[in-house]
C-alpha cells in the first residue's frame, strides 16, 4: 500500500500523540500556516498542506521563496507525512477536489486548520491609516474575499468529512482575540476580516459539539513571519536588529510558538471543555500547555500591547517574555 493512502492507525506515544490523525492546514505556504503544519507533523500527523504558491506558480502575494511543496517536505522531515495540494480556497471546485482527495486517500479528516489570508500586500498599501471611504473598494472587497469568504468555503466543504472523525477539531487562525478585538482594527475591511474567524469558531463550536468536536480561534502575537523579517531586512537569526527600527518588535515571536501550542491543544483529550467556541492567543495557549518559543521564552504580545502600548502601564517587552 502506498504510504500516502495507508489508513492503518499507528502506535501512539508521548512523542507522537497525533500519529493516527489526518490534518488539513489550509494556507500553509509560509508563516503560521507552515509552522502549524510542521508541528502537527512533528506530533505524528499526516498533514495535507495547501496554498497558491508552488514551485511552478506564484500567487498575488508575490513571494517565490516559500512554496507548499517545501512545507510538505518540512512536515515529513519533522516526522509526519506531508502532502502538498495546490489549492485556491476561493475556487469552490478546487476545494471540493481537495476534500475529495482526502476522502479517497484517508476516508476522514480529524483536524482542519483555516489559516487562509495572503492580504498583507493590500493592507500595507491601501488600508492602514485610511478611512473606509478612502480605501479602494476593490482592495477592501478583496480583503474580505481572502480573509472571510475563503474560510467559509473551506469550512462548508470540509466539515462533512471532518465530522467523520471521533474527535473533530476545527482551528480558525486570525489576528486578535475576542477581547483584544474590542479595540478597532484600524480599517473596516481589516476589522471585519479578522473578527469573522472568531465568530466562525464560536458558531462552529456549537455545531461540532453534537459530534464530539470543537472549534477554536487562535492568534499569534507580533509574528516574525518570513514576510515580516523581509520587511525589516533581518533574518530569524538576527531579528533583534529590527528593534532599533520598531522597539515593540522586541515582543515578537516565531511562527513556531503558536504552532507548538496548537499541536499541544490538538493532543489534549480535554480540549473541548477548555477551548470550544473560544478565542485564544499564542500566549494564552502557551501558559496552558507549558509551551515555549524557539528561544525558550514565553512572549505574551497581546498583554504587552494592552497594558503598555495602549494602557500606558510602565513596562518593557522583556517584562512580557
Image (spheres, rainbow, N blue to C red):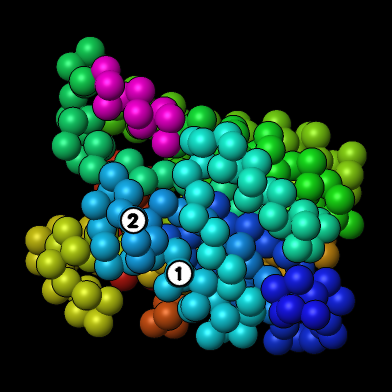
Q: Is residue 139 magenta?
A: yes
Label whose residue precedes the other's in the sequence (1 or 2): 2
Look at the image and say whether residue 308 sits in the magenta stretch: no
* Residue 44 picture location, percent across and down: 69, 79
Residue 103: image location, x then y, percent: 77, 54
Q: Label 2 belongs to which residue?
A: 57
Determine whether the residue tagged by mark 2 lies in a helix, strand or loop: loop
- State the image coordinates of residue 217 (x, y, percent, origin top left): 59, 46
Secondary structure category for the residue under label 1: helix
Which residue shows up at 78% across the image and 47% down it?
161
- Return the residue found at the far left: 245
User: What label does residue 69 carry, if any?
Assistant: 1
Query: Which picture quadrant has residue 200?
Result: top right
Which quadrant does the N terminus fall into? bottom right
Measured Cα–Cα span from mark 1 to mark 2: 11 Å
Which residue is depicted at the point 42% across and 73% down? 70
Image quarter (top left, top right, bottom left or bottom right) of the C terminus = bottom left
Rendered view: 299 above or below 161: below
Residue 17: give x, y in percent of width and height: 75, 78
Q: Can residue 63 be seen in the rendering of this structure?
A: yes
* Mark 2, other Cα within 10 Å: few <14 / some 14–19 / many ≥20: few
Amino acid at each position: 500500500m502506498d504510504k500516502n493512502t495507508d489508513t492503518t492507525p499507528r502506535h501512539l506515544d508521548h512523542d507522537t500523540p497525533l500519529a493516527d490523525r489526518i490534518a488539513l492546514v489550509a494556507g500553509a505556504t509560509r508563516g503560521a500556516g507552515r509552522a502549524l503544519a510542521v508541528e502537527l507533523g512533528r506530533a505524528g500527523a499526516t498533514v495535507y498542506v495547501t496554498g497558491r504558491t508552488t514551485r511552478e506558480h506564484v500567487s498575488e502575494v508575490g513571494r517565490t521563496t516559500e512554496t507548499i511543496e517545501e512545507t510538505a517536505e518540512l512536515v515529513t522531515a519533522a516526522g509526519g507525512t506531508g502532502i502538498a495540494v495546490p489549492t485556491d480556497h476561493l475556487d469552490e471546485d478546487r476545494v471540493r477536489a481537495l476534500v475529495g482527495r482526502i476522502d479517497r486517500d484517508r476516508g476522514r479528516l480529524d483536524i482542519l486548520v483555516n489559516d487562509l489570508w495572503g492580504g498583507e500586500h493590500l493592507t500595507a498599501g491601501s488600508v492602514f491609516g485610511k478611512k473606509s471611504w478612502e480605501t479602494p473598494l476593490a482592495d477592501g472587497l478583496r480583503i474580505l474575499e481572502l480573509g472571510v469568504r475563503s474560510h467559509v468555503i473551506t469550512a462548508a466543504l470540509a466539515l462533512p468529512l471532518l465530522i467523520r472523525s471521533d474527535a473533530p477539531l476545527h482551528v480558525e487562525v486570525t489576528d486578535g482575540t475576542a477581547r483584544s478585538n474590542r479595540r478597532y482594527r484600524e480599517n473596516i475591511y481589516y476589522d471585519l476580516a479578522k473578527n469573522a474567524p472568531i465568530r466562525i469558531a464560536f458558531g462552529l463550536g456549537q455545531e461540532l459539539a453534537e459530534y464530539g468536536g470543537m472549534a477554536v480561534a487562535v492568534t499569534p502575537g507580533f509574528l516574525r513571519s518570513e514576510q515580516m523579517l523581509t520587511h525589516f531586512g533581518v533574518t530569524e537569526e538576527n531579528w533583534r536588529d529590527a528593534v532599533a527600527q520598531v522597539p515593540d518588535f522586541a515582543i515578537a515571536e516565531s511562527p513556531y510558538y503558536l504552532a507548538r501550542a496548537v499541536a499541544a491543544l490538538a493532543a489534549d483529550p480535554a480540549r473541548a471543555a477548555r477551548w470550544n467556541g473560544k478565542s485564544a492567543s499564542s500566549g494564552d495557549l502557551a501558559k496552558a500547555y507549558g509551551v515555549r518559543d524557539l528561544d525558550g521564552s514565553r512572549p505574551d504580545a497581546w498583554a504587552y500591547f494592552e497594558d503598555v502600548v495602549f494602557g500606558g502601564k510602565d513596562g518593557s517587552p522583556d517584562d512580557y517574555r
